[in-house]
Amino acid sequence: MEALIPVINKLQDVFNTVGSDSIQLPQIVVLGSQSSGKSSVIESVVGRSFLPRGTGIVTRRPLILQLIYSPLDDRENRSAENGTSNAEEWGRFLHTKKCFTDFDEIRKEIENETERAAGSNKGICPEPINLKIFSTHVVNLTLVDLPGITKVPVGDQPEDIEAQIKDLVLKYIENPNSIILAVTAANTDMATSEALKLAKDVDPDGRRTLAVVTKLDLMDAGTDAIDILCGRVIPVKLGIIGVMNRSQKDIMDQKHIDEQMKDEAAFLQRKYPTLATRNGTPYLAKTLNRLLMHHIRDCLPDLKTRVNIMATQFQSLLNSYGEDVSDKSQTLLQIITKFASAYCSTIEGTARNIETTELCGGARICYIFHETFGRTLDSIHPLAGLSKMDILTAIRNATGPRPALFVPEVSFELLVKRQIRRLEEPSLRCVELIHEEMQRIVQHCGNEVQQEMLRFPKLHEKIVDVVTQLLRRRLPHTNVMVENIVAIELAYINTKHPDFHKDAALVPSLLKSDSDPYSQINLGQRRANTPRNHMSPQVSAHSAASQQPQQQQNNQQQQYSEAHDQNHVGENSTPSMASTWLSNILPPAPTRPDSIENSASNTPVHNNMVSPVKPVNLLPDVPANHNPRRLTDKEQKDCDVIERLIKSYFYIVRKSIQDSVPKAIMHFLVNYVKDNLQSELVTHLYKSDRAETLLNESDHIAVRRKEAADMLKALTRANHIISEIRETHMW
């Protein structure tokens, strides 16, 4: 059991070498109000006077004090080189290698270090001072002396000095592996003790709190501390121990600690004879040693688990920083190959680390093709931006000076090409989106590659530059191919296309001559609906008699039209009738009261669909058109014929472009970059004279690697020490 505290001291040394406080070791934290006697208690336990003394706040930095029992035959801690082979006691600070055999020099060193960090006028500093005292008279303990709790700022102390000291105290006593030594003066009311209040806040069960009552000899005449020491006033689970400190006059007269011990024992025998054996400084030291050993025994299993977890974490961190580069040419080639492989894997969807927060790589490319680009094309109405007067004007321009008996084919070609050209801009915008995503993939190539990029910033910069230049060179080729796809469709209007031939076959039925009785009846019906036209009874009767066969013909045409419209995506909706997603980003289509596609009630609205990426509008704004006048019957028929033919052929071309553009982009841009990326990187980067420059590490990576390596070494050593003590005690 006695070997447990030296084990903790060794662990403390291990973590002090790397400047880490991430492992909370068992220790005794001395807590109390200002001038309550904390430093005097510590000096009594050590047996030497070595702490700064005075009035007001004297302890202004935490002091981590390790008491190490070192017999004369101790070869581990004693050395002839530093003059401690025959010394009974000496001290050594962490910040200096010098050994102090004069305790007055230890006091001066503490004062100098305090003033260096906290100033010379009552300021405090949370940075601790680490001191080891080796002696043949002490028990193994680890104590932490903290600044006394104060209320009013003095000197150059800030206004929030009370909060600062409280935060500093809580940092140490909140450690579940610490024992709280709550110091209170006997000549004050225990119910107002700040030390006991803070201890109860962090240790409500009292399992790690021990109370010490100082200045027993300074109580008012006629009073005693029997009720306090017996726990009748405020019970403390681990007990309450009373001690008698040296007065300020004794300190000024340099009264020795041994003399004080004798006076304390005599005072306890005279004033508290029944409690003398369970109070006093010697009993306090033994109690602290016993409590700390049992506490260490209970904490050791969890401590070993914590050390193992941290060792695993720092090993992974060290692996992420990579080893020192010996063969830079080989390392450069490995990084280039790894990056090219990760880039292609991100496109193909075979990367190890798959994004779960957003679409990236090949998944985003697929989304652009089928959602952004596909839906945009589907939303383009074949007659958007084309009014009746535009169609009529095109028909008249195609006939020249002669009135036309039939609808000229030239007008159809002229108008359908105008509509097909509207598909070019969304197609080119699709190329831009894919190009941007290919550039963005550089940032989604996996954690392993990204760590290498952070490690070698110059190499990262060059790789990004090579990828950017490759994509930039391929962009014009892809744009030209997409433009050619649209130009090919414009070059030849294939009126013999099998899908187009079905609608073309209906043209004769729409071009009935005006002498056709059904046409005359139809004309009479339209005139009947005009308020300024008055029909004769004969015409009305004739119209009623002829209504049934005309209605049958109209129904047949409408049934075929509806059947044909259902075979084309988007025919039954204008641009404003697209899906909910597109209706929010596309400009509304012009209102066409005579169009059968104007009904918005047939379009389902999917309120539950959420787009995984921000939608993009690929269409330019289309101005609304207005019909300036009413058309004649023949003009209306001619316009209906042209509209039907334009719609039919437009759907054919749109379907072809919707299929061909993604294929062209994949071939000329995506697949080309995938196939040639590694060769491009090797050509531009893999040169022996540039490897030295490209593989220069950033400064912070080198520093972090050294810190991680030192911490891993310390954790490995700590784990070895804990394992040894557990095997020794059969735990």
Image (tube, rainbow, N blue to C red):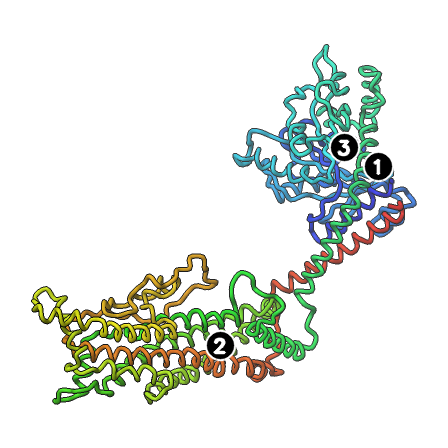
**Relative to 425, 9 lies left or right:** right
Residues packed near mark 2 inside 10 Å, few (<14), some (14 to 19) or many (20 plus): some
**Element type at mark 2:** helix
Compare residues 618 and 370 and report the one nearer the observer: 370
Figure quadrant of the N terminus: top right
Amino acid type at mark 3 = Glu
CA gap between label 2 and label 1 equals 69 Å
Query: Which residue in the protein does label 2 denote?
Result: 468
CA gap between label 3 and label 1 equals 13 Å
Q: Position of residue 407 (x, y in %)?
A: 21, 85
**Relative to 354, 497 lies left or right:** left
Q: Position of residue 318 (x, y in %)?
A: 69, 62
Furthest-right residue in view? 73
Q: Position of residue 495 (x, y in %)?
A: 32, 87
Query: Which residue in the protein does label 3 denote?
Result: 43
Query: Which residue in the protein does label 1 denote?
Result: 139
Amino acid type at mark 1 = Val
Residues packed near mark 3 inside 10 Å, few (<14), some (14 to 19) or many (20 plus): some
Q: Would you identify the image quadrant in which residue 165 lies?
A: top right
Q: Which circle, 3 or 2, is nearer the viewer?
A: 2
